[in-house]
Image (spheres, rainbow, N blue to C red):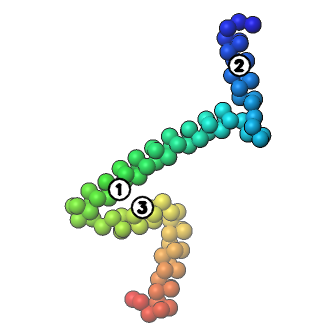
Amino acid sequence: MGQVALQDHDEQEAEAIEIGGVAGKRLKSFLDRIERLEEEKKALADDIKDIYAEAKGVGFDPKIMRKVLRLQKMETEKRREEEELLDLYMAAIGID
């Protein structure tokens, strides 16, 4: 076998090594990928938080902005149904 073929064979053999039915190298790869994505997710969440703070600084209400974003993502019919139910429930308890 050539050098590359031996290296590939060694990597495949290492991949095949299992402890208690778990392929350690493969598991480590998955965990590393998840960890990187979690770090990216935190960075994005921090960026979003900064944008809400900036918007609040110029007079917008972040709570209402979140609600608008949630409603914006909904299908029109689902949004109308939710609004009608909200109106019905509010009327049932006497809120105008």
Residue pointed to by mark 2: 10
What residue is drawn where x is 72% and y is 23%?
12
Q: Based on the displayed image, in which of its 4 quarters is residue 21 positioned? A: top right
> Which label's residue is closer to the chain start, 1 or 2?
2
Say which of marks 1 and 2 sits in front: 2
Residue pointed to by mark 3: 69
> Which label's residue is closer to the chain start, 2 or 3?
2
Q: Secondary structure at mark 1?
A: helix
Residue 56, compared with residue 1, is above or below; it is below
Residue 81, compared with residue 14, is above or below; it is below
Type of amino acid at the residue the image marks with label 2: Asp
Type of amino acid at the residue the image marks with label 1: Lys
Q: Based on the displayed image, in which of its 4 quarters is residue 4 positioned? A: top right
For disc 2, the neighbor class at 10 Å (few under 14, some 14 to 19, many from 20) is few
Measured as percent of width and height from the top left, residue 88 is found at 50, 85
Residue 8, compared with residue 65, is above or below; it is above
Q: Based on the displayed image, in which of its 4 quarters is residue 51 positioned? A: bottom left
Of residues 41 and 30, the one nearer the viewer is 30
Measured as percent of width and height from the top left, residue 47 is found at 35, 50
Mark linked to residue 26: none
Measured as percent of width and height from the top left, residue 32 is found at 56, 38
What residue is drawn where x is 23% and y is 65%?
59
Task: Report how far apart the C-alphas of labels 1 and 2 lie in the structure.
Answer: 47 Å
Which residue in the rendered view is the most extreme toward the front? 19
Residue pointed to by mark 1: 49
Task: Report how far apart the C-alphas of labels 2 and 3 lie in the structure.
Answer: 51 Å
Type of amino acid at the residue the image marks with label 3: Leu
Say which of marks 2 and 3 sits in front: 2
* Quarter of the image where the N terminus is located: top right
The reply, left or right, for residue 32 in relation to residue 8 is: left
